Image (cartoon, rainbow, N blue to C red):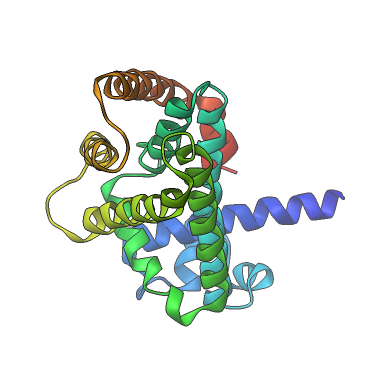
Amino acid sequence: MRTNSIREIRRGELSRAAFEAVIRYGLRKTTLEKVGSIAGVSKGVVLHHFKDKGALLEAVFRRSNMLLSGSVVELYRYAKTPYERLWAIIFANFCDSIFNRPVCQAWVSLISEVPHNKGCQRVQLINNERIRSNLIHELKHFLPADEVQEVASHIGVQIDGIWVRAGLLPQIIDTSTAISEMEFTISKMLPYDEVSAARHKEARKKIETVADIALGSKIFKEKFLRV
């Protein structure tokens, strides 16, 4: 048990170092030597835990998706209504901890590897399905049953699109801009009469405050960003 624990800790450190390497150098220039250098270990240690660069990239995907999942779970703790849970999903995808220019650029670089790496494909499909499932669970409170899945897919595409633009385009797309774009999408795809609009606004405000505190806390960062 002790050995497994140490091994998992080391793999987590190397996954984090690999992601940092992609942020610094881009995917093409990221090497096992550079990952080892960032982690403070030799290339041999990296190879001991990951047989090749492809396996390391798969671990990076798993780690990034763990951060997203952890953000959703954390915000769900404070969300009490369908409105708040829907906005928890949105804020989890665009919180400052994971949505910033260097990370978005690294993500775009990594996502280009998906068609060529079956492990990365599996992880990305699982992540996409998790987001879609979360959205479907909440959207059924707002829409007729026959519209839920299509709207969930459109919102998922919108989330991905904002990430891609944030990683590719020269202008900076920050969390506030991303959330406002998602609010526009929600207003067009969901019922948005005067009462609904007020409830969405109230839910967004609450979850935004919670996200600033909960996702920016030392405990959350140590649990999900440094392990």
Q: Is residue 49 left or right of residue 60?
A: right
- Identity of the residue furthest to the left in this view: 171
Which residue lies most toward the right here?
A: 1
Dividing the picture into quadrants, the one containing residue 212 is top left
Please give the count of numbered marks on the rendered protein: 0
Q: Would residue 112 be visible to someone looking at this image? A: yes
Q: On the image, which quarter does residue 182 sit in?
A: top left
> Position of 30 compared to 171: left or right?
right
**Residue at the bottom extreme of this rendering:** 116
Residue plotted at (39% across, 67% down): 111
Residue 194: which quarter of the image? top left
Tell me residue 185's x, y (percent): 25, 43
Q: Residue at x 45, y 58 (%)?
A: 19
The image shows residue 82 at horizontal and vertical percentages of 48, 28
Is residue 36 shown to the viewer in this render? no
- The foreground one among 38 and 140 is 140
User: Residue drawn 28% across and 57% down?
Assistant: 161
Toward the viewer: 24 or 82? 82
Q: Residue at x 41, y 50 (%)?
A: 147
In front of the other: 40 or 51: 51
Q: Is residue 169 left or right of residue 117?
A: left
Up/down of 24 relative to 97, above or below? below
**Residue 46: percent from left, percent from top:** 60, 68
Q: Position of residue 148 (x, y in %)?
A: 44, 48
Left or right? Give the position of 192 relative to 152. left
